[in-house]
Structures are given as C-alpha cells and as structure tokens.
C-alpha cells in the first residue's frame, strides 16, 4: 500500500512537496487554516483537513491539531517544509512518539543544532571553521566580563544561544556599551526563548553569506551539492540567492566542504541540511546549521539536477537511494529572485486580491509559486509569493535570463518587490558580484 504524507505547511513549499510526493507515488494530505481555503495545492492533494483558524498559532503551529489530522487520515509521515514547526525539536519528538515519521533529522539532532553554542562546538570538533569568540560561562563580575570581551576584540556580537530568526543578537562597538548590551540581550533572550545563555563572537564587518547544502542518510553517507551565495539581504532576509558562490578561495572551500561532510557523519545526520557561513577575505566562519529544506534550495537543484525534496522523502521513508558524490555533476549557474507581497520602497506587506498575473517561462526559467489570477493573498503569513529561478551556462547569461523573466512576470492588484528586483539585476555592484550582506541596506538603498 502506498505511503501517505501529511504536508504541514502552506504556500509554495507545500505545492513543491506535493509535486515531489506525486512523483514518488505517495498519497498526500494537505492541511490548511480557515484563512487559506484557496491554496492551490489543496486542489491537487488526495485529502485535505482544516486544522484551525487563520492565526498561525491556532493552525500551522497547532501541534495537537496537526497530529489529529495525521491520525484521522492515517498518514504515515509528516513533511514540515520551512518556517512554522520545521525546526521545532518538540514537534519532531511528538511526531516520533505518536508513530509518525518526521521528514527531517531526528529530534535530538534538531535540538543540538538549535542551540547555537552546542552547534558551534560540534562544528568545531569536526574541523569546521567557526567565528572566533567566547562560548564559556559568562562570569558575574563586570571586570571579568570586560576582560573576556577585550580578548574577543571590538566590535563584537553578543548572541543568545537559543536565538533564531535574527533575534537575540546585538553588536557592541566599544567597552562602554558592553554591560548594558549584555543585560538587554539576556533579558530579551529570556523573554523570547526562555533561555538566557549568552556567548560572544567577533563581529565580521562586511562578509558575504555563503552556505553549503548537504544530504546525508544517517548511515555514514553524506554528499554536498556545493555552495550558494545569499548575500543580497535586507534585515537578514534573503532576497536573491545563487549557486554556486563565485570568487571563493578554492583551498578554504575544499577544506570547509570536507569538514561539513565529516560533521554529518559525526552526528549521524539524516536528511538534508544547510551549513551557513559568513565569508570574508578568503575565510569561512560557520554561523549555524539549518536542519530543514531552505527557500533557496532550487538554485542548488538547478546546477546539479538533484531533487532535494525527493531526497528528503526518500531518506526519511527508507526508500532506496544512493548518495554518491561522484554522481553529482555541477553545471552552469542558477539564480533565484524572491517575489514578496510588499511595497518595493517601504517594504510594508501588501496582502489582497491578485486581479491578474502572468508567470515567466521559457528555456532555463523555473517558477515556484502557489499564486494565480484571482488568488487572495492573506495577511496572516509570510509575504513570499513566488520564486523566479533562472539557469544558464554562466552568471552573466543567468542575469540576462533573469532580467528577461522579470520583464515577462506580471502581477496586478497588490504591490510586490518586483521593481526592486528589476533595479537590482541591473545594478553594477551586483552584476560584478561585489556586494556583501550590508550592500542592499547600505549603499544601494541610500543611493
Ligand atoms: P539567526 O539564527 O537568528 O538567523 P544567525 O546566527 O544565522 O542568526 O545570524 C543571522 C545574521 O546575522 C547573519 O546572516 C549575519 O547577517 C548576521 N551575523 C551573525 N553573526 C555575525 C557575526 N559574528 N558578525 C557579523 N554579522 C553576523
């Protein structure tokens, strides 16, 4: 009998997962909130279950309701996607305890990687280069704290070990700010995460954001799908991503890739994951590992031909799959533009009716999206509407193809960041690959 997968997400990633399930002849259960009845993948799923009202807390984050939906439909496994419960170790544990396969690594690995101090220590043990800093116990005495900070060096970052989503971090430029910044970050961390463990890290001034996609089966086999460059960001939200990252020190990359695979084997990682790094002056600095699929996974798929979502399903369901690095052939360049429902200048969300839309198409163009003409973008969720992905032999041709795809794309009724992408794709700093994570908010938007 065919296995049944409950897709515990919404929007484009729910549709992406549904398509992968179909290709593997897996039955699907789509859950939705009462504010999300018009989602495209609901019409394609074998079964649908409403799990609660529009508020995410009462629906997509409502663990008892999701587990009941799995129970009543006889689902075997739960696909979490990204966001919502995807990196919630308690959710993974409760799936496991209720007899459902959680499609991702084990709850204990999610828990380890969700704690940044533990993640850094494990990464360091496997030989991954980390951001220098102090991750021991911070003493009570102010003088002792100042001494530790002095050793790390200014500017430095105070980070909450349980932090995430860009919260629980603070930059300290000089000693006079240190103690109050420490107290504030501790208080915020206690309120937001119920854990006020803090550590210090050197502040990397103008890095690029480079990440490595890995796939591992938990049985000692791990491969990588190369790098992605996600340096075009605003408030730590990625806007354009590409693969592979170019102009990277070859020797540093080779060593870092090897160490990432070693970590996967050392911690018996099972599933797909991403190791995120800051990269500056030829050096990699590990910042965190995401134990889930990422929004930007398509660019790695496009340069390797490897279906990352199908791999997640196969690994978790124990379907036959061999992971052989030699079979991964890298080809060309890929780029993704995230189209968000927001004002292109103020970045204020812009939900509402899409009167008309037209997707881009043609050779080397991929459009991952759940929107259609007449679709109403609800105000309750993330503003991601669509991912436009282009692939070509070189970065230069890939940019040209993206400019053409963006010209073809059309949405009427709501505001989107479409015009921002059109300007960025013609920006000389971006075209020369000279931007870093501070570029968009700094020199670009201030122009
Ligand atoms: P989160 O889990 O909240 O996303 P991360 O540790 O991934 O936190 O950091 C988010 C972002 O903060 C990074 O992409 C980078 O822009 C910035 N950042 C984090 N650590 C440093 C650092 N040591 N130096 C400079 N910037 C940093």
Image (spheres, grey):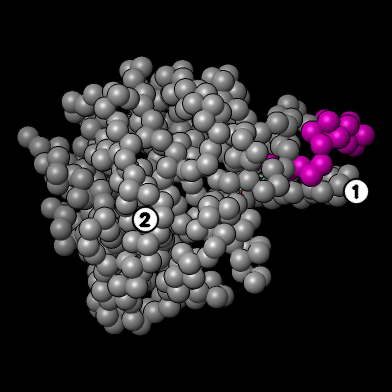
- In the picture provided, is 427 more to the left or to the right than 291? right
Q: How crowded is the residue under tag 1: few (<14 C-alpha within 10 Å), some, or many (20+)?
A: few
Residue 176, numbered label = 1
Q: Does the residue labelled 2 lie within 8 Å of ligand 1?
A: no
Q: Pointer 2: what residue?
A: 398
Asked whether residue 162 appears in the rendered view, the answer is no
Q: Is mark 1 on a helix, strand or loop?
A: helix
- Left or right of 96? Residue 122 is right
Screen quadrant of the N terminus:
top left
* Percent of width and height locating residue 185: 73, 47
Mark toward the start of the polypeptide (2 vs 1): 1
Whether residue 3 can be seen here: yes
Which residue is the extreme one toward the right?
Answer: 143
Element class at badge 2: helix
Q: Position of residue 246 (x, y in %)?
A: 48, 43
Mark identifier at residue 336: none
Residue at 33% across / 81% down in the picture?
Answer: 412
Residue 306 sits in which quadrant? Answer: top left
Measuring 25% from the left and 48% from the top, which residue is drawn there?
A: 17
Q: Is residue 161 magenta?
A: yes
Magenta residue span = 139-162
Hey, which quadrant is residue 214 in on the image? top left
């Amino acid at each position: 009998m065919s296995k049944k997968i409950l897709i515990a997400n919404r929007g484009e990633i729910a549709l992406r997962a549904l398509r992968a399930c179909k290709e593997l002849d897996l039955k699907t259960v789509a859950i939705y909130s009462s504010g999300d009845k018009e989602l495209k993948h609901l019409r394609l799923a074998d079964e649908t279950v409403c799990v609660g009202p529009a508020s995410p807390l009462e629906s997509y984050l409502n663990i008892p309701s999701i587990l009941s939906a799995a129970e009543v439909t006889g689902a075997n496994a739960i696909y979490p996607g990204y966001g919502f419960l995807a990196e919630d170790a308690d959710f993974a544990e409760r799936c496991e305890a209720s007899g459902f396969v959680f499609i991702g690594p084990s709850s204990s690995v999610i828990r380890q990687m969700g704690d940044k101090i533990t993640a850094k220590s494990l990464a360091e043990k496997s030989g991954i280069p980390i951001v220098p800093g102090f991750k021991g116990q911070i003493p009570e005495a102010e003088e002792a704290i100042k001494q530790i900070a002095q050793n790390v060096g200014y500017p430095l970052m105070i980070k909450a070990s349980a932090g995430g989503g860009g919260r629980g971090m603070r930059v300290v430029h000089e000693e006079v700010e240190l103690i109050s910044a420490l107290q504030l970050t501790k208080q915020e961390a206690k309120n937001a995460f119920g854990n006020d463990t803090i550590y210090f890290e050197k502040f990397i001034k103008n890095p690029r954001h480079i990440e490595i996609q890995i796939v591992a089966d938990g049985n000692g086999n791990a491969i990588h799908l190369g790098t992605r460059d996600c340096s075009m960001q605003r408030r730590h939200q990625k806007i354009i991503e590409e693969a592979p990252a170019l102009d990277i020190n070859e020797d540093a990359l080779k060593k870092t890739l090897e160490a990432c695979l070693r970590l996967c084997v050392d911690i018996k990682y099972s599933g797909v994951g991403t190791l995120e790094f800051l990269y500056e002056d030829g050096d990699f600095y590990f910042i965190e590992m995401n134990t889930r699929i990422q929004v930007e996974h398509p660019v790695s798929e496009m340069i390797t031909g490897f279906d990352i979502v199908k791999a997640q399903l196969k690994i978790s369901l124990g379907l036959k799959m061999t992971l052989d690095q030699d079979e991964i052939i890298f080809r060309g360049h890929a780029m993704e533009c995230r189209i968000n429902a927001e004002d292109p200048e103020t970045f204020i969300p812009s939900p509402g009716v899409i009167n008309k839309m037209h997707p881009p198409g043609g050779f080397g163009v991929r459009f991952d999206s759940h929107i259609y003409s007449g679709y109403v973008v609800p105000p309750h969720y993330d503003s991601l509407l669509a991912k436009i992905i282009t692939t070509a032999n070189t970065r230069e041709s890939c940019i040209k193809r993206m400019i053409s795809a963006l010209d073809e794309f059309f949405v009427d009724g709501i505001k989107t960041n479409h015009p921002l992408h059109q300007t960025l794709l013609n920006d000389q700093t971006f075209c020369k690959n000279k931007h870093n994570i501070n570029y968009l908010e700094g020199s670009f938007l201030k122009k």
